[in-house]
Amino acid sequence: MNFYDDYVKYVSGRIDSPLVFIEASGFHLLSATLSRYFQYAYIQHKTKPNTMFVLSSIPGRTRRSTLASIDRSVYSLVYQEIVKPMDAKTDKKKLVYDSIIEEGSPEGILDGIGDYVKKVYGPYNIDYQSTEFGDVMKTMSGKNASYHRGVARIISKTYYGEGTKINLSKHGGKSRFLEEGVYSTMFGGMQKANLYIDPYHVEQGLLRRIILVTPKDYRYKPFLDPFRERDRDMSGFSDQIKAIHDKITPIFKRLGEEIPVVPLPNVEAKLNEIDEQRATAVAKDDSYENLIKQSDSEHLLKLATLLAINECNISGDRLHVNIKHYEKAKDFFDRATGGNEEFYTNIGVVSRPAFTDSSSFNRILKYIPHLPGSVTKTYLYKYANIKKEDLEPILEALILSGKVKELPGRSKKYGKS
């Protein structure tokens, strides 16, 4: 029995979504239902293998909403099996909806969380599910942004199970409280990320907690007939997750606390290597891309942990994460985030019209030093305030004219001739 592989194989044969979207759904279902029972043994703050995914693509063709519907149906079936309401008469189907947050105001979300934790026994996990999460992020940048940014704070706090108090000056000065120990997971979607995301989402920390899934060079699958509701029988997958749940909860109860997660030494070495690479990159260039990538090792550890949970790889009352779990997680993560490069370079850029006239050439030349000095394209995006699609033809023209020289190397650089 292997829930993750069976689920990915089954769903990928029935809808024409990118494989990484379906894989992300498999990870999400493990995280949303089972991560609450685990905690990392050697991390100071109480970190769990809870994950947040946002799928990004053009509308329609990648079946984000269809996949979200399938994901929710499995989540609902599992949740009704594992939830323990305070009142035995409580409708478990109603509790499914109480455990899910789609969107809302900061106080509405906090009130919903507060009501939910009063109805069930812990450990607590809420699940953000929004097929239009881009619109949620947009409210944090538009009119009344300071108010709506309370939502980002709540998401960030519940990622680590931290308590907080939020003052709501727009509502009579009243405050809302989020108690410690409520964790969150996410399975959301949006169109192209550059339509919604701005520097605030990076600097506040929200984007470091989310795995933005954007397939690179995605080739559309052959069209598949609609996966109709009447054709779906996802109960087998909920049974598989329930079987894992039934193996781990006796250990959780015996310990009286979360089961410790222990990555093996060779996994720790891989994660530490990535941490060092990311820290070095930020020290050299604190670009938005490098700031976001600081969380890569944490994401990889969580993904690998979910694969260990999938196999119930427990001995000595500890969950062990081995190198096979890590390598499979790394393969997914690299493919899932491979299409984010262009988005990273355009964060915060409001491109001025780029015409191939002398003023446009001079505008770019202003930021390119004479050789042997040089700059990267990323530098030009940032300081010339221009998007990739506008910069490319100008650079090409400058190179053809002989005014700029492109230097060889893995990361292309440019200098005035």
Image (cartoon, rainbow, N blue to C red):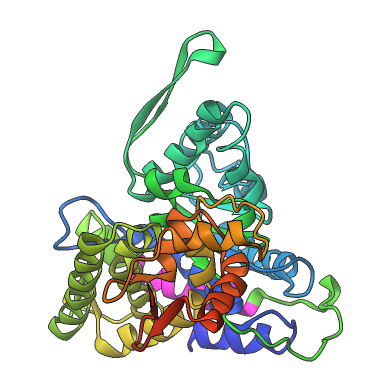
Identify the image quadrant of residue 323: bottom left
Residue shown at 18% from the left, 77% from the top: 273
* Residue in front for this viewpoint, 385 or 266: 385
Residue 2 place in picture, x, y as percent: 48, 87
Question: Does the magenta-highlighted stretch encompass residue 237?
Answer: yes
What's the magenta region?
236-249
Is 285 displayed left or right of 218 in the figure? left
Majority SS type along the magenta span: helix
Q: Is residue 265 visible?
A: yes
Furthest-top residue in this view = 172
Is 413 displayed left or right of 365 in the figure? left
Residue 226 place in picture, x, y as percent: 85, 78
Asked if residue 390 is positioned above or below residue 105 in the image, the reply reads below
Q: Is residue 34 visible?
A: no
How many marks the image carries: the answer is: 0
Residue shown at 42% from the left, 82% from the top: 406
* Residue in front for this viewpoint, 26 or 389: 389
Residue 359 place in picture, x, y as percent: 59, 56
* Residue in front for this viewpoint, 270 or 140: 140
Question: Which quadrant is home to the C terminus?
Answer: bottom left
